[in-house]
Image (tube, rainbow, N blue to C red):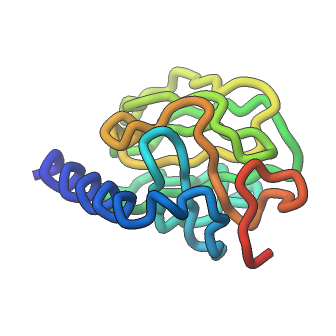
Amino acid sequence: MYRQTILSLCITMFAFDAVAAEGEQKSPTCTENSVHLRGDFGTARFSIELADDPQERATGLMNRTSLAASAGMLFVYDAPIRATFWMKNTLIPLDMIFVDETGVVQNIHENAVPLDTTVIDGGADIFAVLEINGGMARAIGIEEGAVLSHPAFDQTAAAWPCKNF
């Protein structure tokens, strides 16, 4: 069932990409509750919860038994940091997409193991981390070098700025 959901989501996103391929370089209309990703795979959009203060970042997606296929959480920091995560009290596998302050994907940790307390090091100079369902990044084709668009990024320096900010 889970694989069917991922496959359906991917087919939907790629069908959208076929229609929008000509305009994929255009800046997206951004909102606080969604992120847009662009790369060799085309484009994708995730509805997100924003974790932009210490308490929200500490709690993250802990104790959740599910996450919609097109959903995620965006962790945003006040300044670039060495981003480290763990899966303590996290019940579902997650992909972690580590992004610099311009919105460029620097690192991806796939299928983080639920409840594992091993530290996941996303690297230095990370400004934001997008968590999505485990296996989703590979299913879509998200790779290092892809770009993420969201209003949390300084729009004058963003690799893919929002058109409405």
Q: Is residue 155 visible?
A: yes
| Image point (58%, 39%), residue name | 146
* Residue 95 position within the rendered picture, expressed as x and y whole percent measured from the top left: 44, 38
Q: Is 73 positioned to the left or the right of 51 in the image? A: left
The quadrant in which residue 155 appears is bottom right
In the rendered view, would you say 77 is above or below 47? above
Rendered image quadrant of residue 19: bottom left
Q: Is residue 12 left or right of residue 95?
A: left
Q: Looking at the picture, does residue 80 appear above or below residue 38?
A: above
The quadrant the C terminus occupies is bottom right
Of the pair 7 and 62, the residue shown nearer to us: 7
Q: Is residue 66 visible?
A: no
Coordinates of residue 97 in the picture (x, y in percent)? 56, 39
- Estimate the x, y position of residue 62 in percent, counting from the top left: 47, 51
- Residue at 19 percent across and 50 percent down: it is 7
Which residue of the protein is positioned furthest toward the front in this rendering?
Answer: 22
Q: Work out whether residue 22 or residue 137 is closer to the camera in this orientation and state it.
A: 22
The residue sitting at 65% across, 73% down in the picture is: 30
Q: Provide residue 39's location: percent of width, then percent of height.
A: 53, 42
Residue at the farthest left position: 1
Q: Left or right: 46 with respect to 34?
A: left
Q: Residue at x 32, y 55 (%)?
A: 14
